[in-house]
């Protein structure tokens, strides 16, 4: 079915329901960053496949809102659909909300409240009410038009984690959640965020690409613990596990009905992490108390078991990446290597690691100018062949029993320019400087970001993204609330020992090259003294930096010391796992 | 009259008015940082003279709340008064509000709403209402008890600034305020903050110690501009000035009555910068729209004229400080110098400068261990004599026609320890590193603070205060909203070209020594390019650092370059104003 035809059918339904405008987002009921195909309604109705975008359909016009990463792709994909592209962030481009309000003819806006956050839903409701527009959050026509072609919801087995992987029993975690409820004078919490549910119950699933989570909801009170799961995802073993832990299992499909049966309670709600439908159902007969998810704040602090497992997993993952770099440098120019086959080769190395389950995100395998595109993704129809010149950027990670990894290296394949060397060196200095940070308890990533950017800012270069994001443990590779960025807005968690975060400065020169270096760090305590508590970072990633790309004359003696210390440590820890050839090469690279 | 006697009389009045608890703060109607004697009711009733503290009086108990700076002083000053000291910030010490609520017998709390911010008043009102306590914000018994002894309100002549000093006419400034009102869909604003009123009307007064401001209020709408001034502070000249600018003058005393006559308007109100009494009067018959004072945000960005005058004033002020340092180093051990006479001598040097009007705050003149006390103040009964050993810290500034200055240097007088040299060096490195910052537009002081602290944090030392505060132009030496600090809380203004801010890291070792180095910086634009706008700092202060106290082996080559560049610049700019002896010494000190 063509997009134009889908839109025609959609407009017929809209007409019948008296709806003048409807919005499709890309989201599931859980606000997941990645969604499975079943939920890709915006893609279905528009043809646009980017990860971020909202579709607005009205009687005579349809528009797609997306950000700068996707302007070119969206223009291509929307061709012939009659859908207009609205470039978010460009001057004079209204938001989808303001655009609707400016259209005088609109009397009713519809969407599915399950696929937007309560925060966004409340903003829409207020703004549309002020503009005299009816807001209907129960519009979900996808099934009717998509029909049998619609991919079903994934439903994969749920497994419970051994204490050697989780480090803390569910019963201990749930008591902490209950403490939070008591502290906020609340009776219950309804959790919709999948990684928080997995963390709390010490379970993992496989329903979302790259994220080992199961479709689920959870309801916790002082006495009750209920998990909503798809029946077919529950093995006998998991049923026993929940029974043993006194957790009641209910069918996933009954979650919405359940929320309507909750009455006369004070409910802790995080509007940014709860879908609008759940939020409104719970708000009807209960008092809602706005507050952060206690699970989100607990989950980001990794316990001793998790940290020990992470150290081991990051070392093994680093060995795989190091072997891959050696393989690349040795074979480039001799055999055919392209962006896809390189990513496959790296995956092969990872698959050799005991405990490897999956990638933690789609590998960014980018040769030459492709590296300058922040969210480049090669595919069968569009990829480059690697040559013995310039550089290759690879950003990848794995899901293991024992941790989630994320690492980026930019690898010299042949001739490189003096300017490239300068940019690589300053990127490395930025990464090393942040690794070396010592800071007082109370700091957030906003206080530290400048350490990574300073060498680049000093020469008038910036990268248009944060310096770092939190990383989950056997969970999502992007895990709020901890982050390292300089701009305000968004969450800004105070850094605490046990948090795990990336350190990934870069230089992106359009049409020429991209450089990104990414290590993963764990916050650790350094000293307690009369001034307070000082923190620092432990570096989990042990992958060499590219000796050929570093100009030591641009570095201070302190920076050289940091570089040499890191490189030596990489050699000492990684070399025992290498072949003699690999080991010899790594020695040269790091000494 | 003894404190106990004053409290007895106070309790009689409380009894008559049915008030169980009353609070005295140290503030005037304008939320001023420094207040004149007339407003020191908390000091009058308690005997405690510190700059921060609240007094609570109940039937059987009286308590004084103050912070760590004043614990020792308060204990001494409260002796025999029967007033209990509540150490703010210490574990288990309740806030004044929570303490009142915990006293089950309290039915009514009284204070004078003119002397607290609307923000605090609203918090009190809500908390007391929830606890079933009546809140009376119209209790001001000071006159009845203080009687004829009470110092009168200061009332000094108001003067208008020449355009060569202000750089922008009042009529241009007021139009910008009106633009802000329009943008926020507001009809008017009632300004109570004195420095904002002075800035807006291009006038100055002399009613508050160290702050060249006049007691006043202002009311601005699209068509009206009203200033409330004490009649006797208005010379014929100033009356002409206001008439020419179509500003209506009303008596200062009529401001409160006036606010009751304002009706049916949308009024822009900054709760943290408006007193509670004014706020509630205005709120009765009008709609209040919470928002930042447009004057505060405009005033902190100095215009080209102000910046040019500041450059000139800071150079002249730096010459005075440099001459003072030379005088000190030459005479120490030969003549009697104590903390008071040293401060007097520095004042003498400043008085020689054309355009000098006053100090911008009470000089901190601290020898040896006294330097370790952040808010040390020597007085006739308590001062140290300077000797030819250790170090002397002097933090001082002037009010000039053309600017307000603030500078700190720590001066070696004789033998110093290796540790002192290390701490001085790292403090200097911190100050120089912040001076050298290059950063993207959008950064606040929170992003930059670590540059000044890093050398100290790296060795486990911190200073318990911000790194920098905004500085007024011919106004208050502490001028929000711009600031450099790492902790969240408080205002956190985005740094913009023209903002003037201090850079003052330090090391404070109790009972041994204090080191603080303070330069004043102006934000300036560096480059506009594809990444955005890059900013940096221009250093206004040109006072040498102490060569003897710097260990160059602890500094990187970049840091040495910054030091040498600064010292050379100081010599080049300051030496033309020095005597041959002074010049020779300065050459040695800076080369």
Image (cartoon, coloured by chain):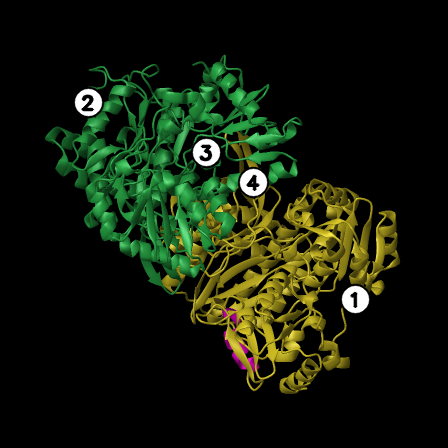
Chain colours: A yellow, B green
User: Does A528 sit above or below residue A385?
Assistant: above
- In the rendering, which numbered label is found on residue B123? 4
Regarding residue B451, the answer to whether it shows in the image is no
Q: Mark 3 lies on which chain?
A: B
The chain identifier of the residue carrying mark 1 reads: A
Q: What crowding class fits label 2: few (fewer than 14 Cα within 10 Å), some (14-19), or many (20 or more)?
A: some
Q: How far apart are marks 1 and 3 (CA)?
A: 53 Å
Indicate the quadrant where residue B517 lies: top left
Disc 4: CA contacts within 10 A as few (<14), some (14-19) or many (>=20): few
Give the farthest residue toward the top: B80
Residue A416: percent from the left, percent from the top?
41, 65
Q: Give the range drawn in magenta.
A: A68-78
Query: Could you say which is closer to the camera, residue A100 or residue A301?
Result: A100
Q: Distance between the residues labelled 4 and 3?
A: 33 Å
Mark 2–mark 3 distance (CA, rounded to whole Å) = 33 Å
Residue A155 is labelled as: 1
Nearer the observer, B305 or B433 = B305
Mark toward the start of the polypeptide (4 vs 3): 4
The crowd level at tag 3 (other Cα within 10 Å; few <14, some 14-19, many 20+) is many
- Badge 1 crowding class, 10 Å Cα cut-off, few under 14, some 14 to 19, many 20 or more, is some
Label 4, label 1: how far apart the Cα atoms are: 51 Å
Q: Disc 3 marks which residue?
A: B462
Whether residue A294 sits left or right of residue B59 in the image: it is: right
Q: Separation of disc 2 and disc 4 at Cα?
A: 56 Å
Is label 4 or label 3 in front?
A: 4
Q: In the rendered structure, the residue with mark 4 lies on which chain?
A: B
Q: Which of A293 and A537 is in front in this view?
A: A293
Q: Is mark 2 on a helix, strand or loop?
A: helix
Number of numbered discs: 4
């Amino acid at each position: 079915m063509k997009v134009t035809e889908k839109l025609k059918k959609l407009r017929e339904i809209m007409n019948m329901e008296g709806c003048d405008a409807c919005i499709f987002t890309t989201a599931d009921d859980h606000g997941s960053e990645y969604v499975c195909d079943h939920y890709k309604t915006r893609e279905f109705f528009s043809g646009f496949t980017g990860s971020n975008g909202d579709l607005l359909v009205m009687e005579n016009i349809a528009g797609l809102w997306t950000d700068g990463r996707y302007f070119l792709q969206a223009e291509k994909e929307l061709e012939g659909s009659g859908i207009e592209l609205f470039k978010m962030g460009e001057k004079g481009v209204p938001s989808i909300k303001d655009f609707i309000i400016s259209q005088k003819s609109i009397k009713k806006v519809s969407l599915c409240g399950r696929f937007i956050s309560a925060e966004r839903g409340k903003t829409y409701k207020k703004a549309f009410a002020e503009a005299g527009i009816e807001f209907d959050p129960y519009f979900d026509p996808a099934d009717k038009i998509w029909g049998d072609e619609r991919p079903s919801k994934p439903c994969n087995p749920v497994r419970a984690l051994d204490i050697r992987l989780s480090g803390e029993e569910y019963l201990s975690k749930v008591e902490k959640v209950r403490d939070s409820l008591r502290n906020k004078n609340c009776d219950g919490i309804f959790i919709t965020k999948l990684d928080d549910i997995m963390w709390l119950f010490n379970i993992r699933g496989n329903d979302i690409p790259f994220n080992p989570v199961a479709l689920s909801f959870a309801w916790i009170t002082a006495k009750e613990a209920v998990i909503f799961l798809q029946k077919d995802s529950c093995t006998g073993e998991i049923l026993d596990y929940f029974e043993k832990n006194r957790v009641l299992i209910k069918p996933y499909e009954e979650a919405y009905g359940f929320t309507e049966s909750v009455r006369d309670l004070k409910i802790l709600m995080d509007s940014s992490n709860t879908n609008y439908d759940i939020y409104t159902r719970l708000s009807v007969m209960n008092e809602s108390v706005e507050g952060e998810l206690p699970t989100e704040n607990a989950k980001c602090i990794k316990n001793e078991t998790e940290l020990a497992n992470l150290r081991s997993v990051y070392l093994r993952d680093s060995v795989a990446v190091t072997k891959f770099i050696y393989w690349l440098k040795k074979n480039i120019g001799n055999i055919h290597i392209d962006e896809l086959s390189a990513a496959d080769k790296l995956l092969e190395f990872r698959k050799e690691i005991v405990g490897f389950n999956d990638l933690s995100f789609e590998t960014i395998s980018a040769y030459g100018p492709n590296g300058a595109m922040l969210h480049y993704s090669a595919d069968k129809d569009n990829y480059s062949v690697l040559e013995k010149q310039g550089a290759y950027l690879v950003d990848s990670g794995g899901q293991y029993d024992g941790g989630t990894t994320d690492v980026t290296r930019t690898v010299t394949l042949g001739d490189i320019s003096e300017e490239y060397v300068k940019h690589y060196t300053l990127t490395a200095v930025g990464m090393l400087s942040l690794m070396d940070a010592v800071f007082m308890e109370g700091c957030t990533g906003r206080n530290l970001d400048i350490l990574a950017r300073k060498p680049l800012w000093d020469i008038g270069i910036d990268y248009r993204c944060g310096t770092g994001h939190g990383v989950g443990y056997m969970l999502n590779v992007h895990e709020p609330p901890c982050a390292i960025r300089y701009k305000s807005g968004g969450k800004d968690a105070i850094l605490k020992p046990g948090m795990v975060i990336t350190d990934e400065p870069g230089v992106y020169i359009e049409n020429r090259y991209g450089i990104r270096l990414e290590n993963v760090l764990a916050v650790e305590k350094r000293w307690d003294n009369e001034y307070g508590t000082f923190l620092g970072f432990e570096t989990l990633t042990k992958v060499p930096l590219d000796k050929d790309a570093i100009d030591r004359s641009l570095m201070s003696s302190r920076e050289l010391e940091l570089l040499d210390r890191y490189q030596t440590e990489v050699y000492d820890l990684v070399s025992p796992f290498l072949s003699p050839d690999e080991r010899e090469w790594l020695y040269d690279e790091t000494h």
